[in-house]
Image (tube, helix red, strand yellow):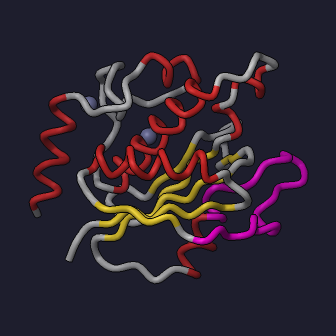
Amino acid sequence: METKIHLIPVGRIEKSILEPLAKQLEKAFGCASEIHQGLDLPQETYNERRKQYSSSQILKKIRSLLEVKRLDKVLAIADVDLYVERLNFVFGEAELGGHFAIISLARLRQSFYGLQENKALFMERTLKEAVHELGHVYGLQHCPDSSCVMYFSNSLMDTDRKRASFCSRCGNKLEKINLQ
Ligand code: ZN
Ligand code: ZN
């Protein structure tokens, strides 16, 4: 059996985002990937008051639709703002040591902050958030090294400061997990 990362677009996500992301994730985790047919945004996960979608509810929906094998890792990608209870927003959410993770692209664009769009920066941020959430799925927790991809991003500044790769400690842990 082989580890595979399954990318599930939730709502419409451009191929020009998904394809390079899949290739980079294959490199980061040393495994295969597959881009799946998109899933419509489940409207019942929308919170009218917050004007955001519940990341946990979207993950629950995907869990109910998708059958996974033991080594499968699933990354859902949504282009809407996501939240969990008690937080204003989240860049993503993941099951620690499980199968499922989700990231939001909404706050990774410069235009969200009224700034000039920068595709390269946007792709870099997307990769960092994707590697971070998938890192959790692989069983990695937050890292105190602010340049490590597993460092907790409280803001986009934290995301921009860290690298898209693992520090040596997290990298070693990941290697051990992959050998299990
Ligand atoms: Zn995290
Ligand atoms: Zn680390």
Question: Against 145, is 8 above or below?
Answer: below
The part of the image, by quadrant, that contains residue 166 is top left
Specify the quadrant that holds the N terminus.
bottom left
Q: Which residue corresponds to the image point at 64% horizontal and 55% vertical from the top-left?
A: 55
Quadrant of ligand 1 in image: top left
Residue drawn at x 38%, y 31% is 164
| Quadrant in the picture for the C terminus | bottom left
The number of callouts visible is: 0
On screen, residue 48 versus residue 147, left or right, reads right
Position in image of residue 14 (x %, y %): 67, 51
Q: Quadrant of residue 70?
A: bottom left
Residue at the image position 65 percent from the left and 22 percent from the top: 118
Reply yes or no: does residue 162 show up in magenta. Answer: no
- Asked whether residue 54 is drawn in magenta, I would say yes
Looking at this view, is 47 or 73 the one in front? 73
Q: Which sits in the foreground, 55 or 161?
A: 161
The location of residue 133, given as percent across then percent down, is 44, 47
Q: Nearer the viewer, residue 172 or 96?
A: 172
Which of the 4 quarters of the picture holds residue 104?
A: top right
Magenta span: 37-58
Which residue occupies the extreme right position in the image? 48
Left or right relative to 7: residue 83: right
Left or right of 130 in this view: 143: left
Q: Nearer the viewer, residue 90 or 172?
A: 172
Task: Give residue 156's position: percent from left, percent from top.
Answer: 58, 23
Residue in the image at 47% along x and 54% along y = 94
**x, y percentage for residue 165?**
31, 32
